[in-house]
């Protein structure tokens, strides 16, 4: 399917190998044609970029069941080939396939709050028309062949399917919006910040805190939101600090510290989720950000504007279900440690991963019942912590679970050497030149000095790749859960309204909440089976049925 950006387009049927199974069919009303095919055949659509096309179809009242997103797939295939960051658009893929000059990807669209930037059904794109449906067909067939040539084509096909389904979910969630009570939001802001300033600037509570901070330093005025001014104020008080981050300040004994910490927290709420944010991003009782599936290198989602993935718990009090509706909130606890147990093939760790509380099971198995020490060891192994309390705990982990420990160690060593490191389904870590400590970067050699820039860069990339193999696989599990749940909820009236890393929120009629909770649990089991087959590792979901998102466990 291609769009002509005027409401029409062209369709062509394909066979299972991606080859034409019929002639090209021009259509003057693309949305109507898609709706008719959905009702009659429920096909898998092949399109260039769902982020561009699907929101327009949704505005026309058309939902599709399945798709293959060429742009998202091209990015995955380029990464798998060690070419992360090359242009990934349909036009770029077509140019590579035909030997033509490869155009750069267009810059990302600026973030648009709800109700802005939506003109015609299919907004015209700048520049000359893109390749047509015949070119799309050839690019799709080429992608299928490249997928089949990967080390684990079955896994990679699942990755592509989950990534493409994620684009559908993202567009649908953006269209549906997260229920948001403006009156409750205002109450929370007034409680935390006081009244807004009538002349602009910080609200009353922040102004009061800024005055108290200045008093604590013995000065008349101080801009408490300026790290440079705070550092100078602490220096005048005889306290030299590297920065004003919260963890640094908590180690300082000075009367200004608790005031500064409170100011920083409230300032963040005011600037990120205050009155201006509410006016820009909440419309008709819904918060409607633009979600970006695979927006970070590990495959986790991001957002373009609105800060949906960083909503503080206190602000979530404004997320209230509609009258007669409820939220079903599902949180996959201890997801990354369970992923390590599943992918490493360590039988002893996998047995512990079959328990409800993996850390507690680990503690009983190898750490004399000391759950905190077991948690420190497992997280230290995944995140590359090598000092402090982690050292003796890691020694126990290495001795008791050598296969699991070796799995992340191998990823770290490959990363340090500049090699390609992949998730379970085949997402590939960007090379070091993408900002992850490339040992081949143009740095002073430094010989064998472990403190040389090259050695430090290599260790930095090793720490990243150590966690990448786990975090990216966790993102794949969550994306697969989301894709299967979307199918389960189709036609039920329930709607996915929020997704954050390992947490899913469904908005549904109150009488369907129990059935939705059961569906979420089943989809978690399906996601586990699809990724890892018959594994003893459990991936339990903490389920809550609530009226307010802040009340979820």
Image: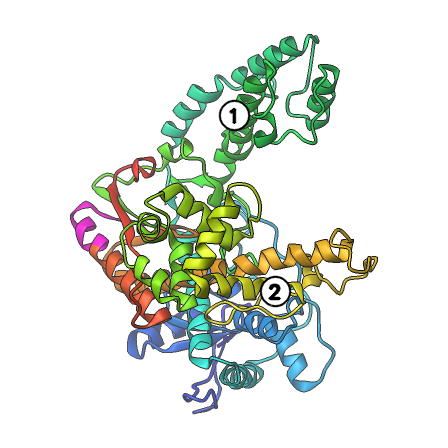
Residue 283, position as x, y percentages in the image: 43, 40
- Residue where numbered disc 2 is placed: 413
- Residue where numbered disc 1 is placed: 266
Name the element at disc 2: helix
Residue 513 visible within the image = yes
The crowd level at tag 1 (other Cα within 10 Å; few <14, some 14-19, many 20+) is some
Residue 53, position as x, y percentages in the image: 50, 65
Q: Which residues are magenta?
A: 504-517
Quadrant where the image shows the C terminus: top left
Q: Residue at x 46, y 48 (%)?
A: 393
Residue 60 visible within the image = no
> Mark number for residue 165?
none
Name the element at disc 1: helix
Q: Is residue 152 left or right of residue 80?
A: left
The crowd level at tag 2 (other Cα within 10 Å; few <14, some 14-19, many 20+) is some
Q: Residue at x 23, y 38 (%)?
A: 323
Q: Marks 1 and 2: in contact by CB < 8 Å? A: no
Relative to the observer, which residue lies in front, 331 or 86? 331
Residue 437, position as x, y percentages in the image: 69, 57
Q: Is residue 486 left or right of residue 106?
A: left
Relative to the observer, which residue lies in front, 171 or 329? 329
Name the colour scheme: rainbow
For marks 2 and 1 on the same chain, the one whose residue lies earlier in the sequence = 1
Residue 77, position as x, y percentages in the image: 57, 75
Q: Nearer the viewer, mark 2 or mark 1?
A: 2
Does residue 404 show up magenta in the picture?
Answer: no
Quarter of the image holding residue 443? bottom right
For marks 2 and 1, give the CA distance. Answer: 42 Å
């Amino acid at each position: 399917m291609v769009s002509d950006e005027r409401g029409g387009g062209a369709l062509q049927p394909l066979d299972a190998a991606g080859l034409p199974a019929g002639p090209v069919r021009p259509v003057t009303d693309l949305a109507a044609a898609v709706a008719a095919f959905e009702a009659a055949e429920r096909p898998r659509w092949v399109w260039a970029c769902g982020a561009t096309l699907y929101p327009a179809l949704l505005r026309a009242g058309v939902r599709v069941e399945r798709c293959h997103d060429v742009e998202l797939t091209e990015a995955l295939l380029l990464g798998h080939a060690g070419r992360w960051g090359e242009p990934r658009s349909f036009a770029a893929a077509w140019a590579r396939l035909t030997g033509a000059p490869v155009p750069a990807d267009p810059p990302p669209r600026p973030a648009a709050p709800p109700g802005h930037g939506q003109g015609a059904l299919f907004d015209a794109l700048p520049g000359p028309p893109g390749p047509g449906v015949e070119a799309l067909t050839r690019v799709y067939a080429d992608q299928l062949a490249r997928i089949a040539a990967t080390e684990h084509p079955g896994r990679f096909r699942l990755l592509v399917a989950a990534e493409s389904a994620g684009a559908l979910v993202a567009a649908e969630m953006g269209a549906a919006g997260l229920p948001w009570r403006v009156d409750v939001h205002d109450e929370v802001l007034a409680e935390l910040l006081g009244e807004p300033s009538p002349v602009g600037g910080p609200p009353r509570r922040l102004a009061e805190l800024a005055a108290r901070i200045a008093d604590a330093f013995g000065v008349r005025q101080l801009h408490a939101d300026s790290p440079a001014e705070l550092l100078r104020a602490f220096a005048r008080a005889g306290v030299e600090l590297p920065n004003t981050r919260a963890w640094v300040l908590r180690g300082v004994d000075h009367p200004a510290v608790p005031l500064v910490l409170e100011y920083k927290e409230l300032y963040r709420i005011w600037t990120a989720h205050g009155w201006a944010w509410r006016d820009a991003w909440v419309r008709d009782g819904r918060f409607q950000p633009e979600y970006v599936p695979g927006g970070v290198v590990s495959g986790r989602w991001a957002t373009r504007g609105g800060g949906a993935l960083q909503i503080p718990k206190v602000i979530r009090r404004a997320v209230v279900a509609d009258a007669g509706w409820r939220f079903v909130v599902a949180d996959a606890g201890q997801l990354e440690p369970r992923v390590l147990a599943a992918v490493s093939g360590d039988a002893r760790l996998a047995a512990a991963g079959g328990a409800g509380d993996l850390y507690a099971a680990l503690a009983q198995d190898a750490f004399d019942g000391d759950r905190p020490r077991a948690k420190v060891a497992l997280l230290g192994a995944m995140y590359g912590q090598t000092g402090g309390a982690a050292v003796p705990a890691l020694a126990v982990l290495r001795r008791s679970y050598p296969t699991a420990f070796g799995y992340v160690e191998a990823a770290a060593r490959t990363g340090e050497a500049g090699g390609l490191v992949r998730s379970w389904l085949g997402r590939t870590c960007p090379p070091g030149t993408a900002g992850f400590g490339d040992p081949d970067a143009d740095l002073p050699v430094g010989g064998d000095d472990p403190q040389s820039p090259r050695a430090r860069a290599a260790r930095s990339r090793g720490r990243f790749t150590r966690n990448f193999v786990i975090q990216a696989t966790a993102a794949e599990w969550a994306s697969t859960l989301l894709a299967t749940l979307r199918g389960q909820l189709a036609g039920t009236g329930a709607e996915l309204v929020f997704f954050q890393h390992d947490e899913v929120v469904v908005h549904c009629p109150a009488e369907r909440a129990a059935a939705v909770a059961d569906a979420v649990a089943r989809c978690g089991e399906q996601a586990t089976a699809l990724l890892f087959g018959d594994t003893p590792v459990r991936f339990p979901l903490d389920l809550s049925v609530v009226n307010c998102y802040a009340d979820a466990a």
